[in-house]
Amino acid sequence: MTNALFAPLHLGEIDLPNRIVMAPMTRRRAAAGKLATALMAQYYAQRASAGLIISESIEVDPLSGLAAPTRPGLFNATQQQGWRAVTDAVHAAGGRIFAQLSHMGRGAHSSQLEAGGRVVGPSPIAATGSIYTANGPLPYEVPHALTEDEMGTVVAQYGEAARLAREAGFDGVELHGANGYLIDQFLRDASNQRDDRYGGSAERRARFLLDVIAAAKTHWPSQRIGVRVSPTNNFQGMSDSDPVSHYGLIAALLDLEGLAYLHVVEPAIQPESLPQVAPVIRQAFSGLLILAGKYDLHSAQAAIAEGRAELVAFGEPFLANPDLPERFKRGAPLNPADKATFYTQGERGYSDYPFLAD
Ligand SMILES: Cc1cc2nc3c(=O)[nH]c(=O)nc-3n(C[C@H](O)[C@H](O)[C@H](O)COP(=O)(O)O)c2cc1C
């Protein structure tokens, strides 16, 4: 079983040396203008031994400039050049990297959007909790429900980001349909109560995602496009009345798209109250599956050896261990992750985690 994580795999046209994926992780180290930096290039290149790196979530909305300014974007040529340095560094180190494309939707705050920007979502239902703003923490706002025309504009933004990702040298794109971002807001029925063709049934709630996939396909072959979902993550008041059957239907629709993979975030520790959705997705989706959520060496090997997934993504373990695959191979101890520096600036807790001594 030790070899399960180290069996090579064809991800579409890309050869992966192992099944260990670096999970997408926001680290808030971008420079003014939402630009990727040389430090970010170093951080990702340090982790190039992953079978596949998925970048932190990258904003597609040009009016999101001030919202979380240290979260990177990909909506202009300067940002594309910043990312080019990252992909060059990862490739020079022998790695492969997909760009995770995201839109905050109702998770944004109007005080942080540029002129003309608006907090939007599928339905006028606010996220729960509060958001940190210049005036301190404020409750999330009720989003403006996107019209079909406005949805077309947002879909085009994803398309443009996908094009820029290609120009920037990424190996593919992952569409962020998880963790309460805009696509997730469309997919789940607590946040999507539309009565037009973008709401009302799981198939209709998936239409926005399918539109975004179609936009990405104008710039990438389908085998270079992945999708991430989190059927039971309840972040910011996200929920769904029947994730098992709804995500079974969504996975069946995604199966027709010829994607590189489907990436499923599972609840960290499966509480009794949360349904097991990944097995249903496994049945409905015939392509490659990535699972994520508190995996360790043992549980990841078991997931692959038992055929529950082809790949496993590691978040905190990869953040803290740039040479995670080598440590797994040797059964070496792992550096603990320092939560205090997840979202701070600079090298500390970012590019200074030690490698194994040779
Ligand atoms: C610091 C941090 C930032 C994260 N940012 C993102 C993100 O940008 N996009 C995303 O889809 N998930 C994000 N996640 C979730 C991870 O991708 C992963 O699903 C989660 O950490 C569970 O995996 P783990 O238990 O191996 O860490 C983040 C997690 C952490 C710890």
Image (cartoon, rainbow, N blue to C red):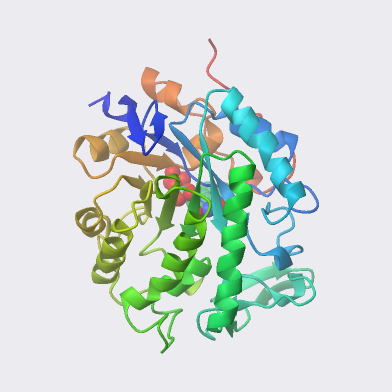
Q: Position of residue 292 (x, y in %)?
A: 38, 47
Q: Position of residue 307 (x, y in %)?
A: 20, 41
Residue 238 visible in the snapshot = no
Direction from residue 247 to residue 190 in the image, left or right:
right
Residue at 54%, 30% (x, y): give it. Answer: 47
Q: Nearer the viewer, residue 25 or 72?
A: 72
Q: Nearer the viewer, residue 352 or 90?
A: 90
Query: Which quadrant of the structure image shows residue 339?
Result: top right
Query: Which quadrant of the structure image shows residue 135?
Result: bottom right
Residue at 55%, 76% (x, y): give it. Answer: 151
Q: Quadrant of the N terminus?
A: top left
What is the tally of numbered marks visible in this picture? Answer: 0
Query: Which quadrant of the structure image shows residue 178?
Result: bottom left
Q: Relative to residue 201, is residue 358 depicted above or below?
A: above
Residue at 44%, 80% (x, y): give it. Answer: 192
Q: Position of residue 149 (x, y in %)?
A: 57, 81
Residue 142 visible in the snapshot = yes
Q: Relative to residue 97, is residue 3 depicted above or below?
A: above
Q: Nearer the viewer, residue 2 or 273?
A: 2
